Image (cartoon, rainbow, N blue to C red):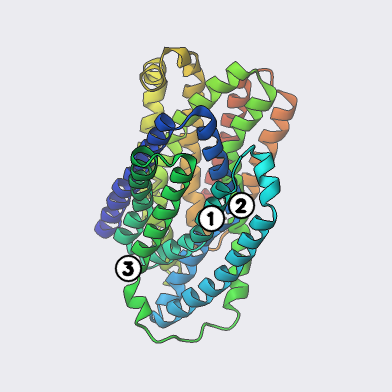
Amino acid sequence: MKRFLRNNFLILILMNLGNVFAYLFQMVIGRVLSPDDFGAFNALNSLAIVISAPMAVLPLVFSRYTVQLSADGLGQVKTLLIDSFRILSLLAVGIFALGLIALPLLKDYLHLQESTPIIIMLTQLLLSLFVPVLLGTLQGLQRFVFFGIGSSGTAFLRLIGAILFVYVLGWGVNGGLLASVFATFGAMLICIMGLKDIWQQERQLLPVGLYREMGKYALPVLIFTSMMMVLGNLDIVLVRHYCSREEAGLYATAAILGRIALFLPGVLLVVLFPEAAKAKDENNEDQRILWLSIAMTALLGGGFALICYLWPVELTVLLFGTKYQAAAPLLQTISLAMALLAVANVIFVYSLAHHKFIFLFPLVGGVITMLSLVFVYHDSAMTIANILLGAIMGILVITLGLKTVKIL
């Protein structure tokens, strides 16, 4: 238990340090680039995120099966890594070729004058395909120092790259994108260093049917990550569509702050998942790490939500200025919703580690209910925020009920 707490503290510091570097990166880019260039830069970044969205399942899948394979030595882990890199290399070549074919369309759609930014973005995208596999392997082996440095190091190196390429050399959008390439390559090297003993192992044959089993496991993980992305992001799009631009701006401000209640304790799941997977493989039914993780998540997420509830105006004005103080009531609601989602997310991740997928029913049902209600009731941003809160409360209550009666 002491090791579990120590690892949680380490990850909490390293991962949230990365969040600070990511925020500073945006500040550097935003202050140097013109609004038009800043918009183009973030549009290209968003496009890369959308294209690579299916890769979000890889860390959990590789973490889960690294735990399983490492019980019999590291030779099978090496085989899994090498085979995966070969497959991803072919995928990378295909994506790059399609990107080059679509180059004229992308330039026109994004209103870009040059092709270079798109080519740099594609390069960064290709490198980023390999990082989730490396991070998932480090997580499964519980090498949290290298995992944390690899994760937060990406943000730190990107900040350094932005200062060098954008601020000092003045390379504009291309410099900002090159900073991401530089950071992704650096993160790969850090992760590879963390796995250096793996490369020295003799390759061993993988269990028969492993890839089929991984594919079956990836499907519920994909559903889970997709639903979490909807709950954590789509409300901003819905408000933008249904409400006035002024309300949408206020809602976006409140959402950016409120999401901290979800992301701040969310890093603890990095430690929980491999610990729970290992306990499952060892037939250890002790659930102390689950309830301890729930308690720490409630403390961190709930603590931030409480601050938002007690001082919403002060917090909003401090970080965004007086023109956004009308977002205060929205911040109270959204931060509470995100804190509750953070608690539910602990149970979701623990269940994934144990190959129990019943939680997907209340999760998917809650998302469908939220979208249906917003389709009918969308007279204000606060209405949508309340629907989001209600849906998440329902998801959490049903999930806790399933856990209580030991269905999960």
- Mark 3, residue position: 193
- Crowding at mark 3 (Cα within 10 Å: few <14, some 14-19, many 20+): some
Work out whether mark 1 precedes mark 2 in sequence or the reverse, and give the earlier one.
Answer: 2
Q: Is residue 143 above or below residue 333?
A: below
For the residues labelled 1 and 2, the Cα–Cα distance comes to 8 Å
Assign a secondary structure to mark 3.
helix
Question: Which residue is at 47% across, 16% downward?
Answer: 324
x and y percent of residue 112 in the render? Answer: 61, 40
For the residues labelled 1 and 3, the Cα–Cα distance comes to 21 Å
Instruction: Count the marks.
Output: 3
For the residues labelled 2 and 3, the Cα–Cα distance comes to 28 Å
Contact, mark 2 vs mark 3 (Cβ under 8 Å): no
Disc assigned to residue 51: 2
Contact, mark 1 vs mark 2 (Cβ under 8 Å): yes
Q: Quadrant of the C terminus?
A: bottom right
x and y percent of residue 275 in the render? Answer: 39, 62
- Mark 1, residue position: 125
Work out whether mark 2 precedes mark 3 in sequence or the reverse, and give the earlier one.
Answer: 2
Looking at this view, is 328 or 109 the one in front?
109
- Crowding at mark 2 (Cα within 10 Å: few <14, some 14-19, many 20+): few
Q: Is residue 37 visible?
A: yes
Query: Of the residues shown, which amino acid type is indicated by label 1?
Result: Leu
Assign a secondary structure to mark 2.
helix
